[in-house]
Amino acid sequence: MLRYALLRLLGAIPTLLLVIVLAFLMVHAAPGGPFDDERVLPPEIEANIAAAYQLDQPLPQQFLQYISGLLRGDLGPSYRYRDLTVSDLIGSAFPLSLKLGAMAMLLAMLVGVGVGTFAALRQNSLLDRALMTLAMTGIAIPVFVLAPVLVLLLAVHLHWLPAGWSGTTGGGRFILPVVSLALPQIAHIARLTRASMIDVLASDFVRTARAQGLGTRTIVRLHALKPAMLPVLSYMGPAIAAILTGSVVVEEIFGIPGLGQHFVRGALNRDYTLVLGIVVFYATLVILLNLIVDLLYGVIDPRIRQR
């Protein structure tokens, strides 16, 4: 298992390098620069600023210097936040984004698995069809549409929840962002769980358990749920990536001072190092989480052995 994990990490290096190269080229291909909206400066001062941030060097040399800094764990200084490095900004904002994403993922797993199992036990019933129709609707509606609709309905019209982050305290301000992130994943997980649970409930070992007189609840809890979770576990990697990328939109909509807001502001301000640092951080996080999901396969199903 350790050898497999190391090989997967080594195999992820080319993927991460490709992400860095593409992000670097796209950021530098965008029109404008990080200091274009400053007041008009004499040419010699502009040249000194460019030299201080190494923006006067050829693009290949800038890339090699950036890679050299990454190998030392240095993501570089921010062009817009004075006296702060990109590592400082990520370190201060990531705990909030992590909390938001973890709560959304937990909610998606609990509700999605519960709804999918409930629908599978009532296969082809009216309730099953209604739940799957809602799930398809949840999959079809993107986060940037769902979040404003929830704000309009629950915050503006009904006044049940706060509409934004600033000026509010307590756990209530987490509800709308977490629900906005979790609802599409609930829909995906519910459909996966239903399909997998139906297959497992039709298997031989479940029929044997029924023949021994075990009840449906006992069969699901002790025998069917664990193997039915394998497709859901496979989806966890893409689901986590979807929540991470979706949090960029949600944090901007609700004004949450997390990594998503830093990413959007960095892109608008042409803060090259900040955008690149967040992209590298997210890409590394997704690769590691996908590796963890693969390793958990062997824990849930002992028949699976990674070689």
Image (cartoon, grey):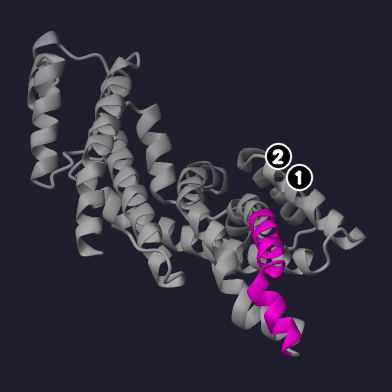
278 sits left or right of 161 in the view:
left
Picture coordinates of residue 115, whole percent (x, y): 72, 65
Magenta span? 191-212
- Residue 39 disc label: none
In this view, the residue in front, 191 or 250, is 191
Is any part of residue 164 visible from this angle?
yes
Picture coordinates of residue 141, whole percent (x, y): 70, 40
Please give the name of the residue rendered at 60% of the width and 83% of the height, measured from the top-left corner: 222
**Looking at the image, do the residues carrying marks 1 and 2 touch, with CB atoms under 8 Å apart?**
yes
Please give the name of the residue rendered at 18% of the width and 41% of the height, measured from the top-left corner: 75
Residue 266 sits in quarter:
top left
Local secondary structure at mark 2: helix
Please give the name of the residue rendered at 57% of the width and 62% of the height, measured from the top-left corner: 174
Local secondary structure at mark 1: helix
Residue that numbered label 1 is attached to:
137
Residue that numbered label 2 is attached to:
140
Amino acid type, callout 1: Thr
Amino acid type, callout 2: Ala
Say above or below: 29 vs 171.
above
Considering the whole magenta stretch, tell me its main secondary structure. helix
47 sits left or right of 297 in the view:
left
